[in-house]
């Protein structure tokens, strides 16, 4: 394993082409097109106000000119301090979503924390190389890796990293210096992107109550805001637990009816003989037990919005009466003699396939077309994987706050398990899992794999052969293998919490140092990988 030498620490990004910076560029590079590359990068960064497009454009240039296999620009979140991938080349969305690090963790975390560039001649031989994105098969290919800090005004805001085919030290040193200069050019753009990293907390155009900023959810947000300005009937589709009622409330809150009532009813939760009374109301004496006149949900929601969840569970008789209301805009109370006009915006939802039900004759075709005016599909959680951790952190903070705590966080091992799980119960299942984890913590403040439900230990995410879709499969692992996985995760988290100090980690785990040493050897873990170094003071002293 060869680690590259560190370049001297530099300051801000002003006067980037002065002799102070140009002297870092190797003489051999001046005639090899590197200056031309720097010029093209400068043009990309100054050609558009879209910071995201600029960063993507720089990575595209590196791929073209340096034959980069993969590349990432990671930034430090101003609020959480976590390091996350902001722009990438050669990564799938699911791989990119796994690219998150703590300062000092892995190569990227070390470069961000130390502010010093690094190269690795062969990543398969470097234990600190985490391959967190799982985008590389380290056993089948030889890869060299370069990572340099991105600075602005002497502050590290992120890192630029590239994968390239195996190269010798001379070539890696040369490209490390080039990337160091490119990272200085990226300083201002990276800072602008860094300021927007946490805007998913209050992203303009995102309906209230929603968490996540994935591409599929951005499309849903756009649809919600678009249809809320109309009076059209909305049909929400999606698996159970994907947030259909939340979407219905968001449509109502963003509409002109927001000051009026929002009524919601689950059609599957009421027996058939009560559905009609619940929807349309009844007159006093209409049937046994009707001791008073009662308004139905349509009347209560007059001027506002009525949300019918699980509309596919309605009987054919109830479907016929609902169709009449949609056509006539009037309702008849049970036992009543006069129609009552209503002005209601109807939103319906189901997790069933209504088209198939129409073909089978269990759902009225004419009603289906009345309801399916503006369909919105809520994606399952497994299709918005980059939203899993923001959602999990949101739930953890909420439940911890309810218990009077503010210091609870999710361990790295637990984060990885959350992202590998397929979430058949979607957001509702994630919410319940996080509530359970917080309750099991006791006085601890770190959620570990053992705090997560058993199902997450028994299942793994695998790629099917058809179109690369992900499916859920029960693993063939034995009980001992599951126990080993838990033990390894606990050791990693103890080492992380103790900064790689064997004595402190052993004490936290209730083990002797000798036993912990044997466990480290068994799992191939090096305590040195958890020694987080930082620069202390102006003299550059290193402390641990």
Image: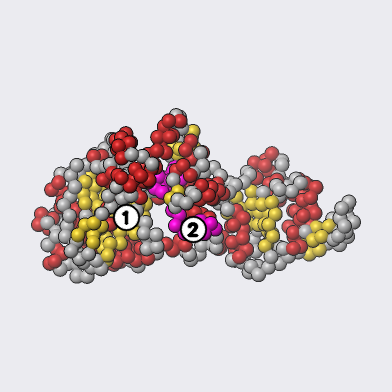
Residue 147, percent from left and from top: 25, 52
Residue under numbered circle 1: 103
Residue 164 percent location from the top left of the image? 24, 46
Q: Is residue 325 left or right of residue 352?
A: right
- Image: 30 above or below 456: below
Residue 469: x and y in percent read 46, 40
Of 538 and 221, nearer the camera is 538
Tell me the quarter of the image containing the N terminus. top left
Q: Which numbered disc flags the more N-terminal residue, 1 or 2? A: 1
Q: What residue sits 51% from the left and 38% below the top?
A: 455
| Horizontal side of residue 227 vs 324, given as left or right | left
Judged from the image, the secondary structure of the residue bearing numbered disc 1 is: loop
Q: Toward the viewer: 461 or 413?
A: 413
Q: Residue at x 16, y 60 (%)?
A: 8
Was residue 416 drawn as part of the magenta stretch in this picture? yes
Instruction: Count how many numbered circles sit on residues in the image.
Output: 2
Q: Which residues are magenta?
A: 400-422
* Residue 418 at least partly seen: yes
Quadrant in the picture for residue 525: top left
For label 1, the crowd category at 10 Å Cα-Cα, with few meaning under 14, some 14 to 19 and many 20 or more, is: many
Residue 23 in the image: above or below residue 417: below
Residue 467 in percent (x, y) is at 44, 39
Residue 50 in sight here:
no
> Residue 153's image quarter?
bottom left
User: For the C terminus, which image quadrant?
Assistant: bottom left
Q: Where does label 2 land, which residue?
A: 405
Task: In this rendered view, identify the residue nearer to me: 149 or 492.
Answer: 492
157 to the left or right of 375? left
Residue 496 circle label? none
Residue at 18% across, 64% down: 539
Residue 306 highlighted magenta (yes or no): no
Residue 8 appears left or right of 280: left
């Amino acid at each position: 394993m060869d680690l590259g030498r560190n370049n001297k620490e530099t300051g801000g990004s002003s006067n980037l082409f002065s002799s102070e910076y140009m002297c870092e560029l190797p003489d051999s590079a001046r005639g090899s097109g590197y200056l031309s590359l720097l010029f093209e990068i400068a043009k990309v960064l100054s050609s558009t106000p879209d910071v995201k497009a600029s960063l993507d454009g720089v990575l595209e240039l590196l791929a073209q000119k340096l034959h980069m296999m993969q590349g990432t620009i990671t930034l430090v979140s101003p609020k959480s301090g976590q390091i996350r991938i902001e722009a990438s080349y050669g990564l799938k969305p699911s791989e990119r979503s796994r690219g998150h690090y703590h300062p000092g963790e892995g190569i990227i975390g070390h470069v961000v924390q130390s502010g010093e560039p690094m190269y690795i001649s062969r990543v398969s031989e470097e234990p600190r190389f985490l391959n967190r994105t799982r985008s590389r098969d380290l056993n089948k290919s030889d890869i060299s890796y370069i990572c340099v800090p991105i600075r602005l005004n002497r502050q590290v805001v992120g890192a630029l990293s590239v994968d390239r085919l195996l190269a010798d030290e001379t070539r890696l040193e040369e490209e490390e210096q080039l990337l160091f200069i490119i990272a200085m050019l990226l300083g201002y753009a990276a800072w602008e992107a860094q300021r927007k990293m946490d805007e998913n907390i209050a992203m303009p155009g995102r309906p209230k109550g929603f968490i996540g900023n994935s591409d599929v959810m951005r499309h849903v947000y756009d649809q919600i805001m678009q249809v809320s300005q109309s009076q059209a009937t909305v049909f929400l589709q999606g698996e159970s637990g994907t947030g259909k009622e939340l979407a219905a409330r968001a449509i109502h809150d963003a509409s002109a009816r927001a000051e009026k009532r929002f009524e919601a009813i689950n059609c599957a939760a009421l027996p058939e003989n009560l559905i009609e009374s619940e929807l349309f109301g009844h007159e006093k004496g209409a049937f046994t037990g009707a001791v008073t006149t009662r308004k139905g949900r349509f009347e209560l929601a007059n001027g506002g919005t009525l949300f019918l969840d699980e509309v596919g569970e309605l009987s054919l008789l109830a479907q016929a009466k609902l169709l009449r209301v949609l056509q006539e805009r009037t309702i008849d109370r049970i036992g009543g003699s006069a129609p009552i006009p209503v002005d209601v915006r109807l939103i319906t939802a189901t997790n069933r396939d209504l088209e198939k039900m129409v073909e089978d004759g269990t759902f009225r075709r004419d009603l289906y077309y009345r309801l399916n005016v503006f369909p919105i599909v809520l994606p399952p959680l497994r299709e918005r994987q980059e939203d899993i951790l923001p959602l999990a952190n949101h739930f953890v903070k909420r439940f911890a706050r309810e218990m009077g705590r503010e210091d609870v966080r999710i361990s790295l091992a637990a984060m990885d398990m959350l992202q590998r799980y397929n979430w058949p119960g979607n957001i509702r299942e994630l919410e319940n899992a996080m509530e359970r984890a917080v309750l099991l913590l006791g006085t601890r403040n770190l959620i570990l794999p053992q705090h997560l439900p058993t199902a997450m230990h028994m299942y793994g995410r695998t790629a099917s052969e058809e179109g690369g879709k992900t499916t859920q499969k029960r693993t063939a692992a034995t009980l001992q293998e599951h126990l080993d996985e838990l033990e390894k995760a606990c050791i990693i988290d103890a080492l992380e919490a103790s900064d790689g100090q064997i004595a402190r980690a052993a004490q936290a785990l209730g083990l002797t140092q000798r036993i912990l040493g044997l466990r480290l050897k068994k799992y191939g873990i090096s305590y040195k990988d958890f020694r987080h170094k930082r620069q202390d003071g102006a003299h550059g002293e290193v402390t641990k």
